[in-house]
Each structure stands twice: as structure tokens, then as C-alpha cells.
Image (cartoon, grey):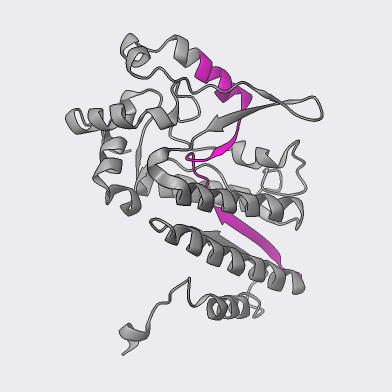
Amino acid sequence: ELCEAAGCDLTSDTPELLHWISKEATSGRFSRICVGNYIYMDGEAHVRVSVAMDLIVKGLVKAGKAQSMDVSVAWLGSPGTCHLIPKEAAEACVENQKNAPIWQKVLLPTPNCITPVTTADGGTVHLFDGLVVQQGPNYALAKTMQMWRAMQLREVEKVIVSAPMAPASRTHSMTHSSFMTALLDGMAHLKPCVAFDADTASAVMATLLMYHIYYPESPSYPAKPLKNPLELFSFHGFHSGYWRVPWSINSLGTVVVGLGKVWKYHPEGL
């Protein structure tokens, strides 16, 4: 009976979950709380579960602030979005395109480099277009919603927010698709790209989370000024090399999947 009753559905039990989590978090046993948003689902369910997570985060932040608690929120950023990257990464992308082998220039003619954007204050920012057709509009919408909430919490609510870019990893959500498995197995042929095992990615991202939460000088702290709210996603990216690969991410699919099927590249220990 206990096993049958255990668990919950985040999309249908959202109010009950918010009440339970808020009650436990503000029970007096904790001086600070951190809520992580790490759920993925296929298709339109990803959008719905992202909305549910968003409602819980908003409610938990409100409850924590009412009790004068230190509240922090965490996401794993996705390179499969459009976001800012450091100037150094953009410059490396241009240089890597110049030095790319001839077979890449023939098969992958679409460059990854985007013309720098001039901001209203006269500054310059560098954009990365990681949107991939195969991931579909639901994935793009869900991840962009999460990025918007991360910026709103940090800039308006003054909440500590950790949202570094996470790498391409051999998680269940990726490897249950033969297409994505082949993509992971082939991407390392395009230097400096590399896919990681789930355990490796988890260890690195957990370390970054600790740094973002406990070190006041990290960009996660709202007291640390940013020139642009989108800069939040350009720090400490563990991005699998996507920021510096010379070719458009959306153009890699067929070539990289083909390489992954006939010439698997999966170094032991990554």
C-alpha cells in the first residue's frame, strides 16, 4: 500500500506539493533553502512541467522571504538555447573556424559565429544560437521560460540564482533516443566538443552549485552587478565545447550522427 501511494505527479499535484515543500522548508529546521529545477519530459509535457516547477519556485521564494530565510534557486542551463557567451569563447569560435580541417568546411558550411550585438549603452555582447530543430519548439520554450525566471528572480527578487550551462551528457533522457545517442558518440570528432557520462557531469555541476550558493563573489549573488541580465548564463559554462565549435549547432546533426554510428568516440572516464 505504501509503494502504491508513494510519489506524486508534479503537473497535477502542484498545489499540494507547494504546500508540503513550503511547510517543511519554513518549519524552523533550516536557516537557508535551495530549490533545484531539474525535471525533463518529452514533448509538450516539458512545457507543462516547467510551469509547475515555476509555480513551486515562486511560492517557495515567497514563503522563505516571509520567514527571512536565505533562498536560492538552481537550474541547469542548456546550450540548446540562445544566450550570451564570453568574448573569449566567441573569438575562439572564429579562430577554430579558420583552422578547421577541409572536410568540416565542405560538410559543415554554416558558421557558428554571430555578429556581436551593440547594446543600448554602447557595449558589445556575443550571442550563441544553440537552438536545434530536432529538439523542437517545446524544448526551446521550456528552457527559455526557465531562463526568464532565473533572470527575474536575480534582478527583481534579489534571489541567489545558479544557472550555469550544463554539458551534453549520457543521461537517460538523452540515450533513450538512438538519434541522440549517436549524436553524443560522434560529437567529439568536432573539436573541442565532447560528451560526458552522467556521473561526470553530475559531479562537476554539483561543485559549481556549491560555489554559486556559498561564495558571495560568484555571479549568482544579486549583489554582484551584471551589465546585462543575460550575462548570468555566460559564467562558468561547462558547455561541452559548444561555445567554441566553429559550426552552427543546428547544422551538426546529420554529420555528427553519421560519425557516431560508424566511428563511435567515447573516451573512457568522461
Residue 266 on the magenta segment: no
Choose top left, top right, bottom left or bottom right for residue 200. Answer: top left
Q: Residue at x 38, y 56 (%)?
A: 42
Residue at (53, 77) in percent of width and height: 17
Q: Farthest residue in the bottom direction? A: 1
Q: Position of 99 compared to 224: left or right? A: left
Q: How many marks?
A: 0
Q: Quadrant of the N terminus?
A: bottom left
Q: Is residue 154 visible?
A: yes
Q: Which residues are magenta?
A: 67-94
Which residue is at 52% across, 60% downward? 50
Residue 159: x percent and y percent?
71, 57
User: Which residue is drawn at the image coordinates 46% and 15% (left, top)?
Assistant: 96
Nearer to me, 33 or 82: 82
In the image, residue 261 lies at what x, y percent?
Answer: 20, 33
Residue at the extreme right of the image, as rendered: 121
Q: Is residue 7 above or below residue 142?
A: below
| The residue positioned farthest toward the left in the image shown | 262
Q: Is residue 168 visible?
A: no
Q: Is residue 41 above or below residue 266?
A: below
Relative height, residue 189 to residue 31 (above, below): above
Q: Position of residue 153 (x, y in %)?
A: 70, 56
Q: Is residue 82 in the magenta section? A: yes
